[in-house]
Structure formats: C-alpha cells, structure tokens
Image (cartoon, grey):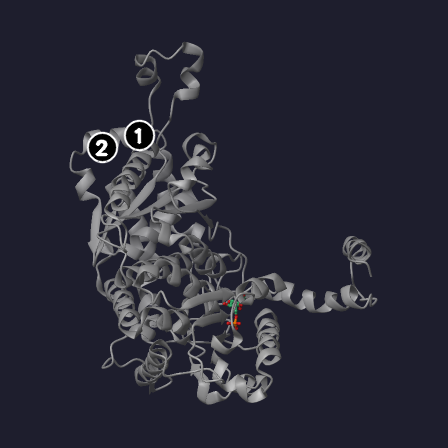
Amino acid sequence: MNADGRTRLHQTPEWTALAKHREELADTRLRELFASDPGRGTGYTLKVGDLYIDYSKHLVTDDTLRLLRELAAATDVFGLRDAMFRGERINVTEDRAVLHTALRAPRDAVIEVDGENVVPKVHAVLDKMAGFADRVRSGAWTGYTGKRIRNVINVGIGGSDLGPAMAYEVLRTFTDRDLTVRFVSNVDGADLHEATRDLDPAETLFIIASKTFTTIETITNATSARQWLLAALGDDAAVAKHFVALSTNAGKVADFGIDTDNMFEFWDWVGGRYSYDSAIGLSLMIAIGPDRFREMLDGFHLMDEHFRTAPAEANAPLLLGLLGIWYGNFHDAQSHAVLPYSHYLSKFTAYLQQLDMESNGKYVARDGRQVDWQTGPVVWGTPGTNGQHAYYQLIHQGTKLIPADFIGFARPVGELSEELKAQHDLLMANFFAQTQALAFGKTAEEVRAEGVPEELVPHKTFQGDRPTTTILARALTPSVLGQLIALYEHKVFVQGAVWNIDSFDQWGVELGKVLAKRVEPALTEGADVPGLDASTKALVATYRELRGR
Ligand code: F6P
C-alpha cells in the first residue's frame, strides 16, 4: 500500500491480470488475429476530428483492451484528468496547476485557478500577440533605423524552442516566405553565428523565449545577440525595437533590458514542454499569421474535448497511452518509435522526445517512493522513407520489440508541381508496405516458394508481429497539427497517471545545470573546483591543454 492510500501499481489485481493475460497471449500472432476476425481492420479504428487512427496491427485482443481499461479505471486516470481540466494543483512536487488546455479554450470558457478565471488573460495575450504579429508581417513594426523587419530569430531552449521550431517546419507551406525565421537554442556559439551571419541587424527581430528567464543558455545567447545588434546599430535604444520577450518572469525581463511592454506573458501553470500554444508560439504566429495560429489552437481544443468527454472505449489518448503500457510494462519494450511520412514533420519526433521523456522519465512515484515498474520509453524516430534506409532493419529483424506510430497524409500540401505531387503516392505506398511487413512478416514457406536457396531462407524470413499504430489525415493543416500534439500530450498524461508519477516536473535536469555552473571556472580560469572527481579533474586538465590554456 502507498502512503497516498493507493495499492502499489504492480500489486493491483488489474496489473496481475494483465501479466497473466500476456502469458496466455504469448503465442498469438497478428496473422491469426486477422484471420479470426475479418472486421479487425476496420473495427480496431477510431476517428477523432481529422484523424483516422488504426490500432488493428497491435498484439491485442478485446480482452487485452478491456484489461488495460480496467487498469486505467483502477488508477483513476479519468479522475486525474478531470482534476487537471478543473485547474487543480496536480503537479504535486511544484504545487502547480497544469492547464495547457486553457491556452486553447474558447473565449467564453471559464477555467479557474485559485478562484480566478484564467481564460480572459489567455485571450488578452493572444490578442496582443496577434496585434504584434500583424504589425511585423505588414511592415508597420520597423527596426530602429526604420527598416522593415525581415528576419525573426527565436532564442530559447527546450520547451521554449522545440515547439515553435517544430511547428514552423510543419507549417512551412503556410508561412510568409518573405520572412526569414530561425531558431537559436544551443549555447554553442556556432548556433547564433550561423543564424545571424548573413543577416542585417537593422532588419532583425529577436524573440527571447524563456519561461523562467534564468536559463543560462538562453540568457547567454540573448546577451550575445544584443551585442551583435548594438555593434551594428550603436545605440541602446535600438533594443526596444529589436527585442521582445516571452516569459512568466517580468522582473528578469526588465533586468535584461527589455521593455515589459514588449513582453508576452504566460503563467506558471503552463509547463515548458506544454507551452508552444502560449506566448512561446509568437515566432510561429508571426510566420503563419494569427488566423492560422488560431486554427491550430482549435485543433488542440478539439482533441482536449475528445479526451475530456469520450468514453474509455473510444478515447484515443487513453488507448494510445494504454498500448504503450502494454508494451513497456508487459512486453519489456524499451523504446517507442514515431515515424512520420512527411518531410514537414522532420522535427516532430524531436519535439515529442521532450514532451514524453521529460514528462515520464522518472523513477520516483508521486508518493516519493521508487517505482517497481517501468515508466517512460525512449522516444525516437525520423521521417520515412529515409529511416527505411537506415534503421528499419532493426525494427523488422532485430532482437528488440519496438512499437511504432506511423503518421501519414492523403494529400501533399504546398505549392508542389504536379510531378512532385505525384510522388506522394510512392511515399504512402512505402508507408502502408512497412506497417504491413512489420505486422505480418514473411514466412519461411513464402520465402521458399520464391525459390530462395535453403541457406538463405532464415535470413529472408520476417517474423512479423511488430506492432504499429497508423494515424492518417487528409492533409497536414494547422488544425491537424494541433490535434496531433494534443493527442500526444494526453497520451503522455495517461501513462503518467497509470504509473503514478508527476508528469509535470523535471527535477532530473537540475543536477547537470548546477554542476555546469560549478565546473565552468575550472575551464576558464583553471580554478581549483572543490569536489571534482578524479575523472572529471583529469578531463578538465586535458581540455585546458588542448584548448591552449
Ligand atoms: O530542460 C529543463 C527546462 O526547464 C525545460 O523544462 C524547459 O522547457 C527548458 O528548460 C527551458 O526553460 P525556460 O523556458 O525557463 O528557459
């Protein structure tokens, strides 16, 4: 029993029932499941908004799904969901509400935190962002010398970078192509150098994005960006026309020298990795325009409402979350691949890595005790078809079980020529071929029937039973992007709720930050930093020698 009155997860009858069921299913093959149920290909699907979700190629039966839903009920996933939507402080270790869903709530919604309706504040900031974005896009907002802004550089890291950087790529076909929009995150000076080297400072707007406004990478890059600007424009007054801030911390923004009139606010109930639909999305809004940004928010909201109201049997985030638990906890799968068949989704999986791994990469439960069960998977993947020629071999014939999400679209987007549009069918033919091959493989008999020499038969045989989810939509629009991101946000939520971990803190990144600050003087000044271990000491000495110090 837990301190919070919950039975330890792995000791619940629902968990034990799943473990037993897993043993019973050990020899079940996807080929058999499909053969015994001709309706499986359409029956094991969900339609939510614009998304068609096919989960038929999973190693599950109706019983598996029922037992998983029973686990969700026993762990009160929907109770925690309702508490989140009500604005309760479900981020227990930081004592905060978790209300990214309020960022996309309609204007007339009422969502209270400590008795205050936060929806008017959300829309006031969205309106301020829209006004600013329109002025930049129209040329009404000019730089210090009166030149039009042609370049926008977002400086931020983690949740203050990955979301807008990903969404900018995803929605590139909706962007103003006359604007250059770049994202600087790495404290490696090469990042800022490459982003600015061919730009005119008089035409460049920096958006400094940091929830805390204390993150060392961002403040260091922002300081260097200011120096770059002032070296060209020569007057501190230029900062007001070339720097805006996105933050929850007005005091630190003012300390940095940015006028708080040029600050776009968000709140402590927005987690960094859940923030790109807040003010953190300003660079994206400038790129695609306020109307498209609002379409994206509507897509998020659609999925929020689905998650909030759909019954367990038809609840897509619940289903995807539970399937992940099925593989991670009952099949020993260590990782989860997200494989989008869209060039525009090139940064999608990198974004999901923070969303999932920073949320659920935890070995301490909400009650402070160590878990006795696996938690978040390693999330990885890149767009198909490129991945097919790199690592799919291991997914098909390796020794590890890697469940995967395949995301694809029926229509290409953008201004492609007819010839390039025609390539889309080949892209999607690969998509369908891969999920088919992964699920059903190729038997030794099938290989032999092709006349393959006996010694090569084992090499050319595919076991199959590699599980995949297919997510299909007509086209990649702002709304579809919002639907997809909210789907994954809530999937991660479901898993954290079942595992009884706090998905909204991130203490695990703190130690490295503290140690970096401590080690830096050893590198720069050769300072004798107390407490350095023998390995790090020797490495620092070697580094200084190689650095020529
Ligand atoms: O990596 C830790 C982290 O706190 C993330 O959660 C966050 O998204 C990132 O750093 C950036 O933080 P900030 O927006 O405060 O600069």
Q: Residue at label 1?
A: 440
Callout 2 touching callout 1 (CB < 8 Å)? yes
Q: Amino acid at mark 2?
A: Phe
Label 2: which residue?
34
Give the side of residue 230 with respect to residue 3, left or right. right
The image shows residue 127, relative to residue 477, as above or below, that is below
Give how far apart the Cα atoms at labels 2 and 1 are. Answer: 10 Å
Quadrant in the rendering for residue 271: bottom left
Q: In the rendering, at what x and y percent does residue 417 appear?
A: 26, 49
Closer to us: 133 or 445: 133
Q: Is residue 17 left or right of residue 233?
A: left
Residue at 59% over, 81% down: 230
- Viewer-nearest of discs 2 and 1: 1
The disc placed on residue 77 is: none
Element on which disc 1 rests: helix
Q: Residue at x 78, y 65 (%)?
A: 522
